[in-house]
Image: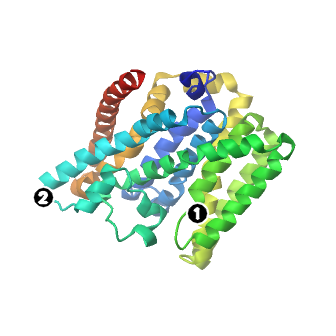
Amino acid sequence: MTQNSVIKSSDKNYAISLSRVLGMIFIVLCHIIQYYSFIPGHSVLAQFFNCAVSLFIFISGYLYGTKTISGFKKWLVKRWFVVSMPAIILSVGVIAVLLFAGETVSLNSAIAYLLDAEGILFISGNVFGNLFEAIPSLDTLWFTTVIMLCYLMIPLLQKVTKKINTDFFSAFIVLSVAAGFVISLFLDKYISLEYFVLFALGYYLGKIKWLDSINLRIFLICTVIFVVLLLSRVILHHYFDDSFIYLQFVAWSHQFIGVWFVIAFSFVSRKYYSLVRTISETSVVRLMDKYSYYVYISHGVFCMGAFNVYENIGSLVLATAVFAVGTIALSFVLKTITDFFGKLLINKMKK
């Protein structure tokens, strides 16, 4: 089996493609919805839309669970280039512009972002908080650190799943995720582990191709849980806001809420495969899917920190236009530069 055949799947999962596009839209809305005061509930909708991070984590784990990775070192280098290199390129550009504009960026912060290590502040601010400060204009990049750390789990996950008897695999998934949940609760003061637990769950479910088995019964059960979690969050927010119970509930319920959208698309795809495929193959959706990651990491430049157009431009309509054009342009430039260096890397690895 060649390296390319290991990494690429012959059958495109249209449900996951649509989930990825939806996740990109949700993430953008998460960061800009607060400025659209005419939308009912705009001040709290951001807390819902950021469930897309969980969606992305789950999808990534699931897709690699459906594959067997050989030549892990080369694969990891390629993953680093696809995930971390765009973040580093973006960091170089933004930090340079910030310094040129007279903004202060500490050396420690610059080094952290140029190493794509900024996400360790998100994982554990208590442990790493004194090492460097976050750069608001690059606030979305924490995800790239987390997902790269998730990728480091794959060799272990791959070895473990090979040793589990298929008859006991479902029980193994439940027990391992439950153990991860308990450990995460005990260590929450020091480190956030929920995304790593979710990645592992996605990987395990990918091994049994669980999304291919979503029927009406499973979908309805998951939908009931989805609604109950949303209602419970509203109630807990009213009575226990900022308490340990509320914060833990938000952290873990968010994982399922994000995954529910993947479940929903998978169910619809099974029932109406031709329609889902037709939608997924439209030029607009394919383009959005192709650039989803670059939009994810780029859009924050224009809605956070020093370059926040919504705070620097008085007109909401004009700010929206600048945000859209800026995000699209930066995503295109970022992908073009990354692809250029990617070709150089591939040619070097072939020698």
Q: Is residue 179 left or right of residue 116?
A: right
From the viewer's perspective, tell me whether residue 84 is left or right of residue 13. left
Q: Residue at x 77, y 57 (%)?
A: 175
Point out the image quarter for the C terminus.
Answer: top left
Residue 327 at what x, y percent from top left? 32, 41
Using the rendered view, name the quadrant where residue 256 is placed: bottom right
Amino acid type, callout 2: Gly
Q: Position of residue 53 (x, y in %)?
A: 52, 50
Residue 141 versus residue 254: which sits nearer the camera? 141
The residue that disc 2 covers is 102
Which residue corresponds to mark 1? Answer: 251
- Cα distance between the residues tagged 1 and 2: 37 Å
State the residue at coordinates (34%, 50%).
Answer: 115
Residue kind at label 1, given as amino acid type: Ala
Occupied quadrant, residue 87: top left
Q: Looking at the image, is 71 positioned above or below residue 136? A: above
Identified at 74% across, 50% down, the residue is 222
Residue lying at 73% horizontally and 30% vertically, measured from the top left: 270
Q: Picture coordinates of residue 226 (x, y %)?
A: 68, 54
Q: Nearer the viewer, residue 191 or 152?
A: 152
